[in-house]
Image: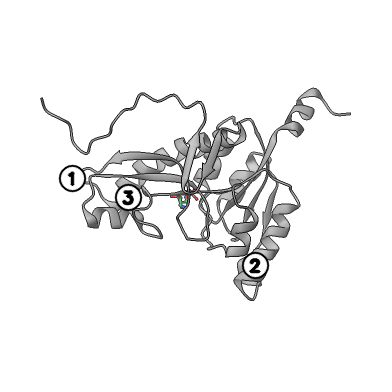
């Protein structure tokens, strides 16, 4: 017989998390006490360290190894079949390092979100911190967005910015951005499961958002 707690958990919206490696963003979602049921963590990489973290949280894990499929289309189909077996309301790409094809992306339009370590649309793709340092930007950060068929592009849900310091290295900058990733990704999932995200075109509206209209500057203003 189900306990009341089990009944409540079953009524919660469910999320499937996709990972490829370390899994720190996945871990941030698992440890954020979100009002969601994480149905499964799926990895395309059987050696992803995040799989072990998921297991310690008693989350079901599954592997769809891209190397076992002839092409992107057949991998995407196998991945979609696995995802659909959990019937999730939301699919969260948490460091999932495979490009997903148009059919896959369109199938999950509006319920597929990604975390990216830059202030999109600046620096899509890999090596974002290196690019930020090379370009000499004063502010860098991270973005959670709905996924579209254009890689690292799509309606932006939340961004967080950090100052780029004169002595920053790839590693120090990445570490500061990662802290912010762990803050905004759970927040975005929370907004999604509360049904507070509406988007039309490229614009995401966050319902009942409390804002103080703060402005961020790249250096302190002096009177
Ligand atoms: C994160 O920086 C994420 O934004 C990017 O890949 C990295 C994955 O890190 N897409 P982790 O696996 O979540 O620790």
* Crowd class of label 1 (few under 14; some 14 to 19; many from 20; radius 10 Å): few
Of pointers 3 and 2, the one earlier in the residue sequence: 2
Q: Is residue 51 above or below residue 28?
A: below
Q: Residue furthest front?
A: 200
Q: Is residue 36 above or below residue 41?
A: above
Q: Which mark is residue 171?
A: 3
Quadrant placement of the N terminus: top right
Residue 32, given in percent of the width and then of the height, sits at 55, 32
Labels 3, 2: front one: 2
Labels 3, 1: front one: 1
**Ligand 1 is within 8 Å of the C-beta of the residue at disc 1:** no
Residue 100, given in percent of the width and then of the height, sits at 56, 62
Residue at the disc numbered 2: 75
Residue drawn at (48%, 41%) of the image = 204
Q: How is the image coloured?
A: one colour
Labels 1, 2: front one: 2
* Crowd class of label 3 (few under 14; some 14 to 19; many from 20; radius 10 Å): few
| Side (left or right) of 61 relative to 25 | right
Residue drawn at (40%, 49%) of the image = 117
Q: CA distance from mark 3 to mark 2?
A: 33 Å
Of pointers 1 and 2, the one earlier in the residue sequence: 2
Does the CB distance between marks 3 and 2 fall below 8 Å? no
Query: Splitting the image into 4 quarters, where does residue 219 fall?
Result: top left
Residue 59, given in percent of the width and then of the height, sits at 68, 42
| Side (left or right) of 214 relative to 223 | right
Does the CB distance between marks 3 and 1 fall below 8 Å? no
Q: CA distance from mark 3 to mark 1?
A: 13 Å
* Crowd class of label 2 (few under 14; some 14 to 19; many from 20; radius 10 Å): many
Residue drawn at (50%, 44%) of the image = 24
**Visible residue check, residue 147:** yes
Of pointers 3 and 1, the one earlier in the residue sequence: 1
């Amino acid at each position: 017989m189900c306990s009341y707690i089990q009944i409540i958990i079953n009524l919660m919206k469910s999320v499937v998390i996709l990972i490829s490696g370390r899994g720190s963003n996945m871990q941030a979602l698992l440890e954020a006490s979100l009002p969601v049921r994480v149905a499964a963590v799926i990895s395309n990489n059987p050696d992803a360290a995040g799989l072990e973290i998921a297991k310690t949280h008693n989350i079901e894990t599954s592997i769809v190894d891209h190397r076992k499929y002839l092409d992107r289309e057949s991998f995407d189909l196998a991945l979609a079949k696995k995802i659909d077996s959990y019937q999730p309301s939301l699919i969260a790409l948490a460091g999932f390092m495979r490009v997903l094809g148009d059919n896959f992306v369109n199938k999950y339009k509006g319920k597929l979100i990604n975390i990216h370590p830059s202030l999109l649309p600046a620096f899509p793709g890999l090596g974002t911190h290196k690019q930020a340092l090379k370009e000499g930007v004063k502010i860098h950060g991270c973005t959670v967005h709905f996924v579209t068929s254009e890689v690292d592009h799509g309606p932006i849900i939340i961004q967080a910015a950090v100052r780029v310091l004169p002595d920053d290295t790839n590693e120090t900058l990445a570490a500061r951005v990662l802290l912010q990733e762990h803050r905004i990704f759970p927040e975005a999932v929370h907004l999604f499961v509360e049904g507070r995200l509406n988007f039309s075109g490229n614009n995401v509206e966050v319902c009942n958002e409390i804002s103080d209209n703060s402005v961020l500057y790249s250096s302190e203003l002096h009177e």
